[in-house]
């Protein structure tokens, strides 16, 4: 009888990465004595009242799920754990970080708990059954840790690319949560204040960094994912970044995407068409980004200063 009840408990737990709590054991009709004995000798305890089935690997996902079960109700993976679950920059898988109304303050290694007096149900989404802070609120949480508008803009771009947020939804959550003294608000305000919703989103973190460096160089308009037309109005190409005031285009070349002869020949032909349309096609690489695009910006300024 007991074996069947244990099997029922474990089969249900498999659907939750092997995680279960005391209430699950009671629902499987294990007796108090059976629960006490298994908790002491058989089950692996992750948090108070939360266990993982024998033999199950304790992965970052398991740790996060178990922490949310321990903090229930209204606990959700947040901050760096939330970023890891949403697969956006700033995530970490070596800690379990969550937000909940209150916590029993148990000292557990690798657990970071943030208390919030109010968590709107709409602030939580579920990823494979794990409660995770929605991306718009997560952006503010990450800003409270990393404190860099440059980095948080990269996070926002990643969220936009994955269609986790819109600029409008981010602005709405920001307006609801903004108050003096809330960590991260000033950083997100700086990011939203310079956001131009009429422009496309850069297609990768390196392209976001390229746009940021070019904007800081004050070279005129910087247009991500710009369409290039010839003087007759015919479409020529779409480039990673365009500088229309300089008639310069820039593509980010990664070794992974542009490392073979066929790709190089195709890129050269494309850049030749761009040049024929009256634009100067340039390329940026990882080394340029590491150096702040110093040489690239100098070359653009030299072109800009030349008489037309």
Image: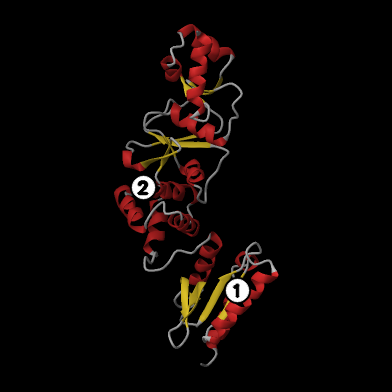
**Could you tell me if residue 76 is visible in this image?**
yes
The residue wearing badge 2 is 181
Percent position (x, y) of residue 224?
47, 69
Q: Which of 24 and 170 is in front in this view?
A: 24
Quick check: 182 above or below 119? below
The span from disc 2 to disc 1 (Cα, nearest Å) is 43 Å
Image coordinates for residue 116, horizontal then vertical, percent: 37, 37
Answer with mark 2 or mark 1, whichever residue precedes in sequence: 2
**Helix, strand or loop for disc 1:** strand
Give residue 132's quadrant in the image.
top left
Label 2 crowding class (10 Å Cα cut-off): few <14, some 14-19, many 20+? few
Name the residue located 38 percent from the left edge and 60 percent from the top edge.
Answer: 192
Q: Relative to 198, is 230 above or below? A: below
> Would you say 75 lies left or right of 110 here?
left
Q: Which residue is drawn at 66% across and 72% down?
A: 264
Q: How is the image coloured?
A: secondary structure
Query: Which of these two is toward me, 12 or 145?
Result: 12
Residue 291, relative to residue 11: is it above or below? below
Q: Residue furthest bottom?
A: 307
Which mark, residue 231?
A: none
> Can you tell which of label 2 and label 1 is closer to the viewer?
1
Q: Residue at x 60, y 66 (%)?
A: 289
Provide the residue designation for mark 1. Answer: 283
Helix, strand or loop for disc 2: loop
Q: Is disc 1 surrounded by few (<14), some (14 to 19) or many (20+) residues within 10 Å? A: some
Residue 35 is situated, as x and y percent measured from the top left of the image, at 49, 12
**Count of marks placed on residues:** 2
Q: Where is residue 82 in the image (x, y as percent from the top left)?
A: 47, 42
Residue 298: tell me if it is visible.
no
């Amino acid at each position: 009888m007991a074996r069947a009840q244990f099997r029922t408990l474990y089969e249900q737990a498999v659907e939750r990465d092997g995680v279960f709590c005391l209430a699950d054991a009671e629902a499987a009709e294990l007796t108090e004595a059976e629960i006490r004995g298994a908790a002491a000798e058989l089950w692996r305890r992750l948090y108070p009242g939360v266990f993982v089935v024998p033999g199950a690997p304790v992965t970052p996902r398991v740790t996060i799920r178990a922490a949310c079960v321990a903090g229930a109700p209204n606990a959700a993976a947040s901050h760096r754990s939330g970023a890891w679950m949403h697969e956006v920059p700033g995530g970490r898988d070596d800690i379990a970080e969550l937000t909940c109304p209150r916590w029993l303050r148990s000292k557990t290694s690798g657990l970071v708990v943030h208390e919030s007096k109010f968590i709107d149900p709409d602030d939580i989404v579920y990823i494979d059954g794990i409660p995770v802070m929605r991306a718009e609120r997560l952006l503010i949480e990450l800003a409270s840790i990393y404190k860099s508008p440059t980095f948080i803009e990269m996070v926002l771009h990643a969220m936009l690319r994955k269609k986790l947020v819109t600029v409008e939804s981010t602005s709405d959550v920001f307006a609801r949560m903004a108050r003096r003294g809330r960590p991260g608000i000033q950083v997100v305000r700086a990011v939203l204040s310079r956001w131009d919703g009429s422009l496309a989103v850069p297609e990768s973190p390196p392209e976001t960094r390229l746009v940021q460096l070019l904007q800081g160089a004050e070279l005129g308009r910087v247009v991500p994912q710009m369409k290039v037309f010839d003087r007759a109005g015919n479409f020529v190409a779409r480039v990673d970044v365009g500088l229309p005031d300089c008639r310069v285009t820039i593509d980010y070349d990664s070794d992974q995407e542009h490392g073979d002869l066929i790709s190089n020949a195709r890129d050269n032909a494309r850049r030749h068409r761009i040049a024929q349309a009256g634009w100067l096609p340039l390329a940026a690489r990882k080394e340029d980004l590491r150096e702040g695009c110093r040489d690239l910006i100098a070359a653009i300024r030299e072109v800009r200063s030349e008489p037309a």
